[in-house]
Image (cartoon, rainbow, N blue to C red):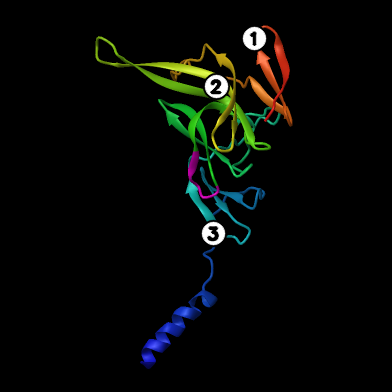
């Protein structure tokens, strides 16, 4: 019986004597944002909290640019991974084309990869170029035929598209011809969005969100 009590006491005391594992070999540490900071090892990033615990393990799909375009507001402006409105950008390659989505603070994908270009979230919304891949059938060689549709959209943090804007044309989703399209929409203030109209320029519109 004494041995049982002794084992039980050791189990209860274990948390007192336990320590978080140190994170070693880090190449870069980003500033904290929304309670988390990105840390880099090579080309992989993870996230630590303010206690120094690694809460999102190192992964290679987080979006960052070693030499960001600070004048831009899209993918190219992202210096290092960070959370905005509890959403962080991730990417995957589809037929060698980068497609973007968002994870939450658990590291789970909550907004599917569907953007060819997109901004980090701000005040609960993001703007980007979403694409839709629609299966149309098989051709005479039994190869699958798809139709692609592209739109400038406004999306909330739940992944709901709040507004569709211009339909985009002329985007080639083949690696030899693909050029990342520039954004045709941008939020400029609460309830105000700028929409680029072909041949006219930017138009400022009011939104009821």
Dot 3 crowding, Cα within 10 Å, few <14, some 14–19, many 20+: few
Q: Position of residue 181 (x, y in %)?
A: 57, 19
At 53% from the left edge and 56% from the top edge, which residue is drawn?
A: 54
Quarter residue 146 falls in: top left
User: Is 57 situated above or below 170?
Assistant: below
* Image position, residue 126 (x, y; %): 62, 32
Residue 29: x %, y % from top left: 62, 50
Q: Secondary structure at mark 3?
A: loop
How far separated are the C-alphas under marks 2 and 3? 36 Å
Which residue bears the numbered disc 2? 180
Query: Is the residue under label 3 in contact with that under label 2 (CB below 8 Å)?
Result: no
Q: Are marks 3 and 1 in contact (CB under 8 Å)?
A: no
Dot 1 or dot 2: first in sequence order is: 2
Tell me the quarter of the picture where residue 187 sits. Answer: top right
Q: Which residues are magenta?
A: 105-110
Task: Name the residue at 63% across, 19% down.
Answer: 184
Question: Does dot 2 land on a helix, a strand or a loop?
Answer: loop
Task: Name the residue rendered at 62%, 22% in the picture.
Answer: 183
| On-image quarter of the N terminus | bottom left
Residue nearer the viewer, 6 or 22: 6
The spot of residue 119 in percent (x, y) is 62, 31
Q: Badge 1 is on which residue?
A: 198
State the image quarter where residue 163 is shown: top right
The rendered magenta stretch, by its main secondary structure, is classed as loop
Q: Which residue is mark 3?
A: 23
Q: Secondary structure at mark 1?
A: loop
């Amino acid at each position: 019986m004494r041995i049982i009590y002794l084992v039980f006491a050791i189990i209860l005391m274990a948390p007192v004597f336990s320590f978080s594992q140190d994170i070693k070999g880090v190449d870069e540490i980003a500033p904290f944002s929304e309670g988390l900071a990105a840390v880099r090892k090579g080309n992989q990033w993870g996230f630590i909290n303010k206690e120094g615990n690694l809460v999102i393990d190192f992964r290679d799909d987080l979006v960052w640019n070693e030499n960001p375009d600070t004048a831009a507001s899209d993918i190219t402006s992202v210096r290092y991974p960070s959370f905005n409105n509890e959403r962080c950008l991730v990417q995957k390659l589809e037929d060698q084309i980068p497609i973007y989505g968002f994870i939450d603070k658990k590291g789970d994908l909550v907004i599917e990869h569907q953007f060819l270009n997109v901004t980090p979230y701000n005040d609960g919304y993001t703007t980007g170029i979403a694409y839709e891949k629609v299966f149309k059938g098989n051709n005479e060689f039994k190869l699958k035929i798809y139709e692609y549709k592209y739109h400038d959209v406004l999306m909330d943090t739940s992944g709901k598209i709040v507004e569709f804007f211009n339909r985009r044309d002329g985007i080639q989703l083949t690696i030899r011809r693909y050029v990342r399209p520039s954004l045709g929409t941008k939020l400029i203030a609460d309830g105000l969005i700028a929409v680029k109209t072909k041949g006219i320029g930017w138009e400022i519109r009011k939104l009821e969100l």
